[in-house]
Amino acid sequence: MKTGILVSVIIMGCAALPVAAQIKCFERDKVTSHLDEAFAEASIAAGMTEDGSLLEVFSDIHGKTWTILISTTSGLACIMASGHDWNRLKALEKKAEQKQPSEDL
């Protein structure tokens, strides 16, 4: 009986996940072209993950919309999240301007 209840709770929980929570992957060139044409978004930040994938934040010039992509080495780009009202962290930009990396390392 307890197992049946647990299974029911898990199934109901999975059914409650919004469709938007599902990760969608497409050819990277098509995704970036769509972001540019439909939303005027361009890559504003990027970094490499430990597995060699490229994580990027795309946003339009005014921050009205944003998208986070992870691009794989096979050429796929997966939309991890998207939204509106992107805000640049000015404190971080100022810190980066003040501190330049040392080449003595």
Image (tube, rainbow, N blue to C red):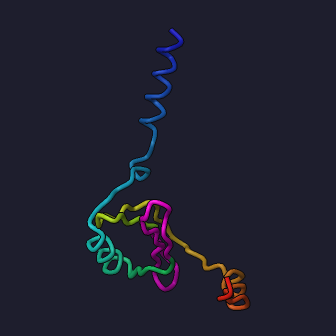
Q: Nearer the viewer, residue 31 or 104?
A: 104
Residue lying furthest front in this view?
104
Residue 65 at what x, y percent from top left? Answer: 47, 74
100 shown above or below 41: below
7 shown above or below 15: above
Residue 68 at what x, y percent from top left? Answer: 46, 67
Count of numbered marks? 0
Q: Nearer the viewer, residue 52 or 16?
A: 52
- The residue drawn where x is 30% and y is 74% is 34
24 sits left or right of 62 in the view: left
- The residue drawn where x is 50% and y is 17% is 5
13 sits left or right of 98 in the view: left
Magenta-drawn segment: 46-67
Q: Nearer the viewer, residue 93 or 65?
A: 93
Residue 98 at what x, y percent from top left? Answer: 73, 91
- The residue drawn where x is 31% and y is 80% is 37
Q: Is residue 84 magenta?
A: no
- The residue drawn where x is 48% and y is 28% is 10
Which of the image's four quarters has the C terminus? Answer: bottom right
Q: Nearer the viewer, residue 69 or 71?
A: 71
Q: Is residue 47 magenta?
A: yes
72 sits left or right of 1 in the view: left
Residue 77 at what x, y percent from top left? Answer: 34, 65
